[in-house]
Image (cartoon, grey):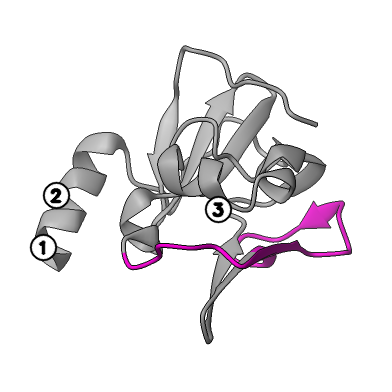
Amino acid sequence: MGRSKASTRDLYFTNDYEWIDFQGSVAYLGVCALKLKDISLVQRIVFAEDAGLKKQGETIASIQYGDHEISIHMPVDGKVISINDALLSNDGQQLLSDSENNGWFALIVPSQPYERKGLMNPVQYKAFTKRKF
């Protein structure tokens, strides 16, 4: 489903450079540009076959490039209701050029839509990345 994201954001981050954008009872999730900084060409994006209920930290997709692979994890417990088919159809260029907006991986229904435990807000994430880089 190539749905565009809403313009109002309720954005949080994981310490593994993934983001989640809560939109009421649903949320978009994706990967931060910092996690992709060494990738110039995505060879393949593979989504986990067992969609549906996932626990926080479970892999929902992987990005394959060169001899490497990056796993994308669930930032919260929830149910995957759709994936971003556009990532599969344009050889990953949308992911590399717009990873934090229209390069989202999945639309989910969080088990607890207002729970932010274990996530960083944008200010905390900025401080976290300054310590790391």
In this picture, residue 93 sits left or right of residue 128: right
Residue 102 at what x, y percent from top left?
54, 31
The residue at which mark 1 appears reads as 131
Which residue appears at 79% of the width and 45% of the height? Answer: 80
Quarter where residue 46 is shown: bottom right
| Residue found at x 63% / y 19% | 24
Distance in Å between CA atoms under marks 1 and 2: 6 Å
The segment highlighted magenta reads 38-61
Q: Using the numbered discs, state the Cα–Cα distance from disc 2 to disc 3 in whole angstroms.
A: 19 Å
What's the residue type where badge 2 is placed? Ala
Which mark, by number, is residue 123?
Answer: none
| Quadrant of the image containing the N terminus | top right
Who's the residue at 46% across and 12% down the image? 8
Q: Residue furthest bottom?
A: 67
Residue 79 vs residue 133, the one in the foreground? 133
x and y, in percent, of residue 64 in the image: 59, 72
**Residue 15 can be seen, yes or no:** no
Residue 100 in view, yes or no:
yes
Number of marks present in the image shown: 3
Classed neighbour count for the residue bearing mark 3: other residues with Cα under 10 Å, few (<14), some (14–19), many (≥20): many
Q: Which residue is mark 3?
A: 75
Residue type, mark 1 in image = Arg
Task: Tell me which label, 1 or 3, sits earlier in the chain.
Answer: 3
Task: Determine the secondary structure under disc 3.
Answer: loop
In the image, residue 55 lies in the stretch drawn in magenta: yes
Secondary structure, mark 1, is: helix
State whether the magenta stretch is mostly helix, strand or loop.
loop
**Mark 2: secondary structure:** helix
- Rendered view: 99 above or below 70: above
